Amino acid sequence: MNQPRTFAHVDTWVFDLDNTLYPHHVNLWQQVDVRITEFVSSWLQVTPAEARKLQKDYYLRFGTTMRGMMTLHGVSADDYLAYVHKIDHSPLQPNPALGEAIANLSGRKLILTNGSVDHVDAVLARLGLATHFDGVFDIIAAQFEPKPAAQTYQKFLADHAVDPTKAAMFEDLARNLTVPHQLGMTTVLVVPDGTKEVVREDWELEGRDAAHVDHVTDDLTGFLAGLSPL
């Protein structure tokens, strides 16, 4: 069995956004989830139950429901993103301890998300983390091809001049760490802390024991704080 990769060599820290930089139990993404169902139901003129089934099928098959709606039904990405990200961000609270832990990491800090820059900006503003990141690679920069597509990571690495063998990736979905690990990144899976109810698909919570997952944490702030002496 291979030893998990470490962090001493890391000079670029890459973070997913939703359910990674804030706790799963906030269930902010649940609001987006509801609006996706509404969008699919309205666009396809199907019942909410039918829309929900299609939404989850597209999410699993295409990486995002949006990609499925674009590919199969000609949806405009701009229209979709504007609708589904129109949510209440107030459940998010400032997290100065996480900000300090991120600030203490040596090197660049980047966000790689299947969401939009507008959504990133709103989330970081609520968390008080807006000044801690050096760049964002969103679904628009990815030309609407979401993680876990290999080309999305390759474009991210090229756009931000990242050496994957000197980078670490933090994600809440194990499948989104497969390609980063293949490219040489140290991978960290961020999981729910187990004390509060979370709204997730079963497959979203899998993969803790996968070979492409180097580390697992249910406390991102504590995990990063433990790395800061490096």
Image (spheres, rainbow, N blue to C red):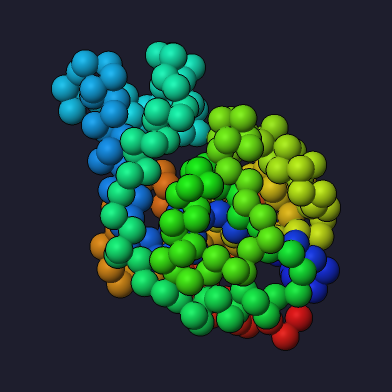
Residue drawn at (41%, 44%) of the image: 203
Please say if 178 is above or below 54: below
- Residue 187 visible? The answer is no
**Quarter where residue 147 is shown:** top right
**Quarter where residue 56 is shown:** top left
Please say if 7 is above or below 168: below
**Quarter where residue 130 is shown:** bottom right
Residue drawn at (48%, 71%) of the image: 128
Nearer to me, 214 or 64: 64
The image shows a total of numbered marks equal to: 0
Residue drawn at (58%, 81%) of the image: 100
Most distant residue in the bottom direction: 229
- Residue 69 visible? The answer is yes
Q: Is residue 217 left or right of residue 224?
A: left
Q: Is residue 189 left or right of residue 80?
A: right
Image quarter where the C terminus lies is bottom right
Q: Is residue 23 left or right of residue 174?
A: left
Nearer to me, 18 or 180: 18
Please say if 177 is above or below 51: below
> Measured from the top left, where is residue 227 in percent x and y?
67, 79
> Measured from the top left, where is residue 121 in percent x and y?
50, 55
